[in-house]
Image: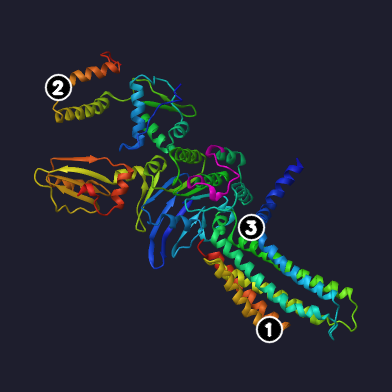
C-alpha cells in the first residue's frame, strides 16, 4: 500500500515542484487516501515514477517530516504520521489563519459576502468529511 | 577540497575574431545534475566541446574527472558518455557496425542494458546510420553512451528531435543513472520544463558570460518579480541595482530584480507602496527575463 | 579458478591492444578500395615485365636486365602518386565524415587514431613495394647473368623507391585534411611531383634518400602535431 501514489506535477505552474509534491501528499492525507502509518514510496521509487531529480523528492519528504506530517525511520522508509501531530496548536493556528486570510481577501475582491462563503465552506467540509469532532 | 567532476576555469574562446566565451567559470560536483541554459549561440556547445577535448580554449582551462581536457586519457574518456545533437556518428556505417566499433573501443560495456535500450527505442541494427531520423540517431547516441556505464554524462541538447515519449524515456534514463552512486550529469537544453524537473544546479549563459550559476531553488529565491502598486504614479527614479526589467503603467510597477534582499525591499518601501506582491516565476520565465534584453511585445 | 584469473589478466593486458586492433580494422575496412588500388600498380607493371621478359631478356653491363631498369622510373612515378593519393584520401575521408570526431570521444586517443592510419599506409606501401622486389629477385634468379651483378645499384634503386613512396604518403596525409577530396588529392599529387623532381635531379642514391627521409620526418611531425590539436 502506498507504493503507487498518484501525484501529478504541473510543469506550467509556478509553484516549485517540491512544494507541489508536499501539497498533494497533504491533500491525499486530508482526503483519507493516505492514512496514518501508511508507507510512502521511497525517494528512489517516486523519483523514477515522476521522472524527477531524487533531491527534489528528498526535499519534499524532509519538509513534510519537519512539519510533522510524515516520519522517516532509517532503513524502513517514510510513513504517514499519526494525525495528532507534533505541531503545537499555536503553530497550527498560524498556518491555518494565513490560509483563511488569503481566502477572505479573495472573497472581498470577488465581492462574495461572508454568508455565501460560509455556505461554500460547509459544502467543501462535507466533501472532505471535515466534522466538528476534535482530533 | 574535493574537485568537481567537471571544472571550467576562466574559459575564454575567440573564434575568428569573435568572442564566444568571455571568462566562464563553474564547477559540477559529483552526484549533481547541472543544467546549462542559454539561447542559441550563447556558447553552450562550445563549452561542452572544449570540455570533451574536441576544441581548444583560447584561454583558461577545463577539467574532466580531474584531468585537463587537452590531455584526456582513455581511462577518463571510458568513463564519460557524450551525446550531442551535432554528433554525427559515422553516417554510412550500419548501426550494427557502429555498435561493434564502440564496443571495441570501450572499457566497460553492458551488452544486456544496451540491447534493452535498443529494444525500448526500437532502433534497427541493420539500417545505416544516415537512414535514421534525427531523433532516432539521438537515441542511438544515448544508448551508446549509456552502454559504457558512464560516471559522467555530458549531453548537448540531447532531446532535440525526440518525440514526447522519447523525451520522457530519456529523462527516466537520466534519473535512473543519477540514482547510482557517484554519477554526474551535465546537460544543455532548450526544454526548460525538463531542466526544471531534473536539474539541481542551473547555469545561464548570456553572450559568453555565465550570469547565473546556482541551485534551482536559490535561483527562484534570488530572482524575484514583484507587482507593486503605489498610491500615486509609480516612481521612475528607483535607484536599485540589478534590476533586470522594470515596467511602469500608471500606479502599477512590475519589476524583476536579481539578488533580492532586505535593502532592496527597504528601498521599495521608502516609496510607501499600497501593495507589493510577488509574482512567482517558472524557470522558463526566469530564463526569458535573464536572456532577453528588450521587453517582450506584450510588456510594452 | 586459475584459468579465470589468467583470463582476467589477459583481458586487462590486452585491452589496449584490442582497441588498437579495432582502430586498425576500422581503417582497413573503410579503405579497402585504396588497398586494391595500390595492388593494381604492381599488377600492371609486373604484367609489363613478364610480357617483356617473354620477348627475350637483354642485359645491361651491370648484370641487370634492361627491362628491370626501364620499369624503375614508371614504377616510382605510379607508386608515388598512388601513395600520395591514398594518404590524402584517408585524411580527407576522416575530415569529411568526421570519423575522428566520433572516435576521439571514445576511450582512445588522437595519437592512436593517427597511428592506426599510418599502419594502413605501411600496408599500402608494402603492397606496392614488395612485389617489385620479389619480381626482380625472381627475374635475377631465373635468368643467368652474362656478367657479375651490381647489387649496389639494385639496393640504391629499391631504397630510393621505398623512400619516395613513404615520403609521398606522408605528404598525402599532410595535405588531406581539407574540405574537398579532389583538392586534397591534387595537392598531394602536385607536391609529390616536386619530390619526384628532386629524385630525378639527384638520381637513385643516398643523397635522394636523405632528402626524402628528412621531408618524411618533417611532414609526419607536422601532421602529428596538427592532428592532435585541430578542432574536430
Can I make out residue C220 in this image?
no
Q: Position of residue B2 (x, y in %)?
A: 48, 50
Label 3 or label 2, whichever lies nearer to me, is 3
Question: Which residue is labeled 2 in the image?
Answer: A114
How crowded pointer 3 is (Cα within 10 Å; few <14, some 14-19, many 20+) is rated as: few
| Residue B190: mark | none
Q: Tell me the quarter of the picture where residue A36 sits.
A: top left
Left or right: where A110 falls relative to B147: left
Against B148, is C141 above or below?
Answer: below
Identify which residue, A95 or B38, lies in the foreground: B38
Marked residue chain, label 1: C
Q: CA distance from mark 1 to mark 3?
A: 34 Å
Residue position for label 1: C200
Sequence order check: which comes first, mark 1 or mark 3?
Answer: 3
Q: Chain of mark 2?
A: A
What is the span of residues highlighted in magenta in the rendered image? B119-136
Amino acid at each position: 500500500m502506498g507504493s503507487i501514489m498518484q501525484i501529478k506535477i504541473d510543469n506550467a505552474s509556478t509553484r516549485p515542484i517540491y512544494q507541489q509534491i508536499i501539497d498533494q501528499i497533504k491533500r491525499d492525507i486530508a482526503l483519507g487516501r493516505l492514512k496514518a502509518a501508511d508507507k510512502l514510496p521511497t525517494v528512489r521509487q517516486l523519483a523514477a515514477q515522476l521522472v524527477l531529480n531524487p533531491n527534489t523528492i528528498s526535499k519534499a519528504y524532509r519538509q513534510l517530516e519537519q512539519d510533522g506530517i510524515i516520519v522517516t525511520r532509517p532503513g524502513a522508509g517514510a510513513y504517514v504520521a499519526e494525525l495528532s501531530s507534533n505541531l503545537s496548536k499555536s503553530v497550527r493556528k498560524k498556518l491555518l489563519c494565513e490560509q483563511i486570510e488569503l481566502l477572505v481577501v479573495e472573497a472581498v475582491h470577488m465581492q462574495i459576502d461572508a454568508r455565501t462563503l460560509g455556505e461554500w465552506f460547509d459544502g467543501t467540509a462535507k466533501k472532505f468529511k471535515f466534522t466538528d469532532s476534535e482530533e | 577540497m574535493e574537485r568537481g567532476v567537471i571544472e571550467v576555469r576562466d574559459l575564454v574562446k575567440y573564434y575568428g575574431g569573435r568572442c564566444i566565451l568571455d571568462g566562464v567559470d563553474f564547477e559540477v560536483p559529483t552526484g549533481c545534475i547541472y543544467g546549462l541554459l542559454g539561447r542559441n549561440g550563447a556558447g553552450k556547445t562550445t563549452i561542452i566541446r572544449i570540455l570533451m577535448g574536441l576544441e581548444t580554449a583560447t584561454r583558461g582551462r577545463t577539467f574532466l574527472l580531474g584531468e585537463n581536457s587537452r590531455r584526456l586519457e582513455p581511462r577518463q574518456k571510458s568513463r564519460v558518455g557524450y551525446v550531442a545533437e551535432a554528433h554525427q556518428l559515422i553516417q554510412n556505417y550500419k548501426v550494427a557496425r557502429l555498435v561493434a566499433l564502440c564496443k571495441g573501443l570501450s572499457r566497460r560495456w553492458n551488452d544486456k542494458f544496451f540491447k534493452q535500450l535498443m529494444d525500448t527505442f526500437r532502433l534497427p541494427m541493420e539500417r545505416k546510420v544516415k537512414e535514421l531520423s534525427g531523433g532516432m540517431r539521438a537515441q542511438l547516441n544515448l544508448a551508446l553512451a549509456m552502454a559504457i556505464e558512464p560516471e559522467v554524462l555530458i549531453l548537448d541538447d540531447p532531446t532535440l528531435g525526440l518525440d514526447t515519449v522519447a523525451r520522457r524515456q530519456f529523462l527516466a534514463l537520466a534519473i535512473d543513472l543519477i540514482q547510482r552512486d557517484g554519477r554526474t550529469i551535465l546537460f544543455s537544453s532548450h526544454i526548460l520544463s525538463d531542466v526544471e524537473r531534473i536539474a539541481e544546479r542551473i547555469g545561464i549563459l548570456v553572450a559568453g558570460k555565465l550570469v547565473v550559476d546556482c541551485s534551482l531553488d536559490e535561483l527562484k529565491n534570488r530572482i524575484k518579480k514583484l507587482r507593486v502598486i503605489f498610491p500615486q504614479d509609480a516612481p521612475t527614479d528607483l535607484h536599485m541595482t540589478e534590476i533586470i526589467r522594470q515596467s511602469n503603467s500608471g500606479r502599477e510597477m512590475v519589476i524583476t530584480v536579481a539578488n533580492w534582499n532586505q535593502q532592496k525591499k527597504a528601498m521599495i518601501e521608502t516609496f510607501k507602496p499600497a501593495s507589493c506582491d510577488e509574482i512567482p516565476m517558472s524557470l522558463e520565465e526566469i530564463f526569458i527575463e535573464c536572456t532577453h534584453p528588450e521587453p517582450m511585445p506584450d510588456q510594452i | 579458478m586459475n584459468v579465470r584469473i589468467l583470463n582476467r589478466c589477459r583481458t586487462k593486458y590486452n585491452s589496449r591492444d584490442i582497441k588498437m586492433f579495432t582502430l586498425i580494422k576500422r581503417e582497413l575496412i573503410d579503405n579497402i578500395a585504396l588497398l586494391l588500388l595500390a595492388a593494381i600498380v604492381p599488377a600492371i607493371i609486373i604484367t609489363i615485365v613478364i610480357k617483356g621478359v617473354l620477348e627475350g631478356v637483354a642485359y645491361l653491363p651491370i648484370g641487370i636486365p634492361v627491362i628491370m631498369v626501364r620499369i624503375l622510373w614508371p614504377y616510382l612515378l605510379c607508386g608515388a602518386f598512388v601513395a600520395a593519393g591514398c594518404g590524402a584520401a584517408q585524411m580527407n575521408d576522416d575530415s569529411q565524415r568526421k570519423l575522428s570526431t566520433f572516435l576521439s570521444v571514445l576511450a582512445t586517443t588522437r595519437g592512436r587514431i593517427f597511428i592506426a592510419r599510418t599502419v594502413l599506409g605501411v600496408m599500402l606501401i608494402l603492397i606496392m613495394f614488395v612485389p617489385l622486389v620479389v619480381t626482380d629477385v625472381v627475374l635475377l634468379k631465373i635468368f643467368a647473368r652474362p656478367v657479375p651483378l651490381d647489387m649496389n645499384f639494385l639496393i640504391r634503386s629499391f631504397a630510393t623507391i621505398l623512400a619516395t613512396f613513404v615520403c609521398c604518403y606522408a605528404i598525402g596525409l599532410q595535405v588531406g585534411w581539407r574540405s574537398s577530396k579532389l583538392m586534397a588529392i591534387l595537392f598531394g599529387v602536385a607536391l609529390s611531383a616536386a619530390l619526384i623532381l628532386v629524385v630525378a635531379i639527384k638520381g637513385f642514391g643516398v643523397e635522394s634518400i636523405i632528402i626524402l627521409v628528412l621531408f618524411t620526418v618533417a611532414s609526419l611531425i607536422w601532421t602529428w602535431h596538427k592532428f592532435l590539436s585541430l578542432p574536430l
